Image (spheres, coloured by chain):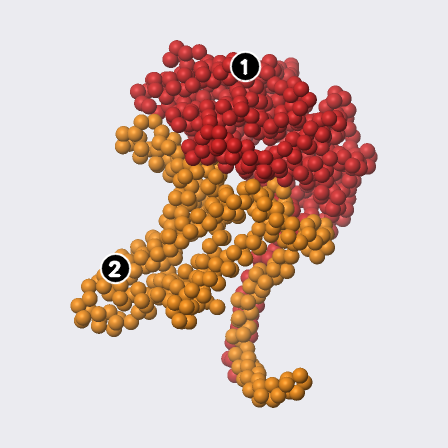
Amino acid sequence: MASESKTKNLENGPGSKTKFAMFKRHFLRDRQLYLLIIIGIAPFILFHYGPMYGVQIAFRDYRIADGITGSEWVGLKWFKEFLTDPNFKRIFLNTLVISLYSLVTFPLPIILALMFNSMRSRKYRKAAQTIAYMPHFISITVFVGIINLIFSPTTGLYGNLFRLFGGEGYPTDFRGLATSFRHIYIWSGVWQGVGWQTILYTSALSAVSNELHEAACLDGASRFKRILHVDLPAIMPTIAIMLILRMGGLISVGFEKAYLLQSPLNLSTSELISTYVYKRGLSDFRRFSYGTAVSLFNTAINITLMLIANYTSKKVTEGEISVV
Amino acid sequence: MKKAKTKQIMSLLIAAVMMLGVLAGCGSSTDQSSSASSGSAGADEEKVLTVGIPQSAVVTDYYNNSFTRYIQDKLGAKIEFVLFSNASEAMNQLALACAAGDELPDVLVGFSNMSGSLMYEYGRDGFFLPLNDLIEQYGTEFKAHMDALPQDEYDRVMDFITKPDDGVIYGLPTYSAVTISDYMQNQMYINRQWLNNLGMEAPKTIDDLYDVLVAFRDEDPNNNGRADELPMLSPAIYYYVINAFVYTDASYPYNITDGKVWAPQVSDEYRQALAYLCKLYDEKLIKFDIPAADAKSTISGDGTTAKVGIWCGNPQTDTNHSCEVLDQYDVLEPLADATGKGGFVVNRPRDLLITGHITRDCEDTELAMRFLDLCYEDGAVTRRRHGEEGTNWVWSEVEEPNIFGGMSHINIIDSDLFNSNNVTWGSLLPSVYTDLNYLTIASTSGIGKEYARMLHAQTELTKTWPTPEETIVNLKLDLGERAERENISGKMSTTSSQYFGLFLSGQLDPENDSDWGRYVADMEACGMNDLIAIYQAAYDRR
């Protein structure tokens, strides 16, 4: 054993030494740049890796006074409670359906980015892009307020338009229909986010060489054919990476908007894992352990999905496109 | 060379500043309290009390505030505030501050969402201090008010704030000795003018209600030639109509009949009520108010023409008090079901909340207790509710009836207090309200004459309305039972709301046996029967 490691050391020795020496030399030379990296890394360690220490409360009966390590160890109690909750099946399905639905809208920013890219007038394109980004900067609370105002059948734009075009009385209140919650949730999200999501694709498109387009033109390719055979293949790696990352967040449906759009009438579709955890774990009961356990459960599913997507992408592209 | 050195120093400085900027977000609410405590360190001659309070939207300034000045003068100490966000979110902030080991303010007031079991937990874990001895020594105002209560109410209040197993008190109450708002929360108001226009009587049964609503929808009762009437508007808490079928208190959804506890939410009557509500909803006779903020503007109509036939709710929170159309509405008496059996109004005992605590970080507990006790002083209660005498209200020479039927001396002259002000603290403080603290009817024109009329008429009427003889509200549960109740009722409320949405949207049919069976089975899976057993045991040992 000892001789083995010695041999290994001998084998790697000079190489490692050189590597270390090189790193040392680079570090000393670029120390100011390394110093700058700290700015990026420190919050990451502080806010992402640091709190992981607290994940153990998912397996404990956390009591504020006893602290994280002092609370009683209860094993999988909270996971069992969540999985045997009579509401579990419904809220898990709700979350899954809304996630898959949102996946359907994945191509929209790509299409929009291609459209922006094909605009002839540079000025017009810039203006259109800026307008499309804008809704991204509206806070979720204000945004839900806007949705409520627009869709109010009594005082909102929707009700007024209904009456303007000859409708009698008040139209159906979509905000209170369980069947329309998902559509409102997803399509309002598209309206708010689609412009912003084009940024990555737009920047990838700007890297496409003009020569390729010129060559395609010479070959008689129409504008649409050029999009299909020049632009789209060029941004395919970006699309694949975005899709893999999107799969990683599939079950993590945003909490705020769903919670704000919720009412007892649409609860059968609007109660998602995140909102249920907020209600049962934080808001009324302060059961931090329960909330942590469910989040951990969520994360485990997300990681699995992401790894599957990554593996598939690796296989399909023969190892060219993957995130890990 | 020198230039390079300067560059290096500059880049170091920039990096350091950026680092600080990034980490600045790590601050917590203790920043406020620590700055507050630093104030106390420098002021030897003047004592400082830090008060944690959920910030009220109507209070413009807590420091330059006449109530703050009044308290400071009486207490002989300076008040520093640690402001939490609104009441329900404040509970989360408090929990996180405790978990993070932050320094807490000396006293907490206005955390009115604090349940008994949560308070005991904070007490057990040492975050709240026991108040028994402090009350004995410095709680003169509190004790005087409590001693003035009838014995059964005294027992109820003391039971509410005392931990059952060891008799320790960790919080002081806000208690209303006047029967008011709980009746108010579950009433229906009908448009009298519309009824007159159509030549109809106010409905007495649910069948009458259906006929009236159809007429409201189809026969243009507001006479403006447009079909812009909304027959009925109800908040998403939909127990108004259900109480015509079976007594259901949304917060305590169990009933007692002949010594047996049972759940109305799975009863046949409830099933009929759901079917009836689905019918109203299908025929566009009822609109559920989503989000709740819509109600005010909808009830107000365009200011002069009413748009709503019947609305359910609380005139205090759901109406624009000075709105003209309010004079068209009268309180609707509880409806009877199809068999003519009388409907109910929810019978909740008088308001009782826990709103004052002293925390473990308080060094001067005497000062903290004197502050909490001062909140019970009549002068402080009146100031907190109505502002300054002479500016906001005047003391009438003779007693006059107040809006809840008792007698009072307070005539309000400035209604701005209902909007933004810097003369109150907004939140509920520990206090005992008596008739004296309420406004006289004569003076309420400033805050909405019709609003006051409705409250008064309704209070008078509700005194004669039917309520069950026994309810579970006052049953005493031990700590374990309370925890179990919170766990089960949380699941049940989600389940019943989900099913209500499913029934209403037509995805399930309450009259279909298999759909109804699914609902009942899910309610049972939440632990409904366990909770019935808990209440039954509490009832049997009472």
The circle on residue A119 is 2
Type of the residue with mark 1: Lys
The circle on residue B341 is 1
Q: Which chain comes out red in the rendered image?
A: B
User: Can residue A93 be seen from the camera position used here?
Assistant: yes
Type of the residue with mark 2: Met
Residue nearer the viewer, B10 or A204: A204
B35 sits to left or right of B242:
right
Residue A101, placed above or below residue B526: below
Task: Using the image, name the chain to which the residue with label 1 belongs.
Answer: B
**Numbered disc 2: secondary structure:** loop
Name the residue at 40% across, 71% down.
A318
Residue nearer the viewer, B20 or B319: B319
Dot 2 alpha-carbon crowd within 10 angstroms: few under 14, some 14 to 19, many 20 or more: few
Q: Position of residue A104 (x, y in %)?
A: 37, 52
**Numbered disc 1: secondary structure:** loop
Name the residue at 48% across, 20% down.
B189
Residue nearer the viewer, A146 or A181: A181
Q: Which chain comes out orange in the rendered image?
A: A
